[in-house]
Image: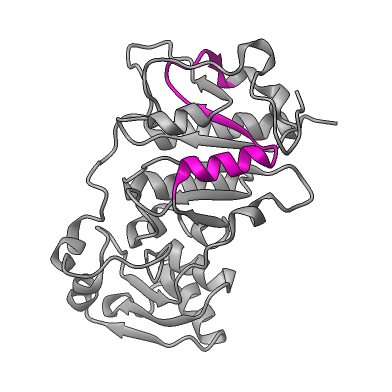
Amino acid sequence: MSDRGGQRGRGKPGGMRSGGQRKSGGRGGQRNGRDRGPQQRNSSRRREQGLGGRQVEGRQAVRELLIAGNRKIERIWVAADLEGDSGVADIVEIAAAQRVPLEYVGAARLDREARSEAPQGVLATAAPLQEVDLESLLDGPTPPLLVALDHVTDPGNFGAIVRIADGAGVTGLVVPQHRAVHVTPTVAKASAGAIEYVPMSLVGGLPTALRQLSERGVWLIGLDDRGPRSVFELAELAVEPVCLVLGAEGAGLTRLVRERCDVLASIPMVGRVSSLNVSAAAAISLYELSRSRQQLP
C-alpha cells in the first residue's frame, strides 16, 4: 500500500477508492456558523483576517494561552467578583510572573466585551494565531496525521475537533479560508486551549490543498456515513501519512472533496440514529487511527 509521492496511483487494493451516495461528516450541532450570546450584540465587528484567535475567553483557554507562551498577550480581564477566587488564582499568578497586564473589571463590562456565551469571568486579547504553510505540516520524525475540515461552520464543533486532535496526536489541521469557521472566542473556549498547540494551515481551496497532499504521498480518508470501509478496518494505513477529511454539519463532504479522497470510510451504527455529530465522529476516527499507530512495533 505504498505508492509514494509524485504521481501516486489512485487505484487501491481492496476496493479502497470507492464512494457512497450519502454525504457525511456528522449531523447535529448548531449550524449558524458564528458565536452566540453576547457576540450577537457585537455583530458589527469585522471578521478577523487569517485564523483569528485574538480574543480568548474561558478559564482553561486563557490558562493555556499563558502556559503555551506562543504569542504575545496584550491584556487579561478578570471579573471583579472573582478577585481572590481560587478558580483564577493560577491565571493571576502566571500573568504576574510573565508581566502580562491583568485588570479586574466589572462583570457587566466583561460580558459586553465577550463574544462567547460563558466567558467564565476571564477574557484575554493576544496576537492572532499564526498559520503554518501546508507543506510544513508534512515535516516531522513520524508520518503526519492530519485533519482537513470541509465547510465546518459550527464553532463549538470546530473547537471540540481541535481539542480531540491535540489529544489524539494530530500533527496539523487544514482549514479553508472561505465558508468555514475560524478561531473565534467560542472555538478557543471549546478547545480548552488546544488552539495553542495544534498547527493549522489556512488554504484558499480545500480540493486543491488535498491534491497537493496526495501528490506528497498523503492518504486521504473521507468520513462518509455510507462509506464502504469501516474506520475500524484501516489499520494498514497506520504506517502511512494520513489526512482525515471531515464534512460539514448535516451536509457532509462536498462533491469535489469527496472525489479527491482515496478512501471513504464510515463509522458502524447499530442503533436507530443514522449518524454522529462531526466532532464525535472525529473523536472515534482519530483515536482509532492513533491506536493503530501506537500498536506498531
Q: Which residue: 77% across, 29% down?
A: 295
The residue at the far front in this view is 7
Residue 211: say if magenta.
Answer: yes
Range of residues picked out in magenta = 205-231
Residue 170: say if magenta.
Answer: no
Give the image's coloring scheme. one colour
Residue 60, how many percent across, how many down? 45, 62
The residue at the far left in this view is 41
233, above or below 152, in the image: above
Depth order, front residue of 250/64: 250
Residue 93, how many percent across, how many down? 51, 80
Residue 92, how many percent across, how many down? 46, 79
Q: Which residue: 69% across, 23% down?
A: 235
**Is residue 290 left or right of 175 when viewed as pictured?**
right
Res. 244 image quadrant:
top right
31, above or below 201, in the image: above
Q: Which residue: 48% across, 60% down?
A: 193
126, above or below 170, in the image: below
Quadrant in which the N terminus is drawn? top right
The residue at the far right in this view is 297
* Residue 168 can be seen in this image: no
**Is residue 22 left or right of 145 when viewed as pictured?**
left
* Residue 88 can be seen in this image: yes
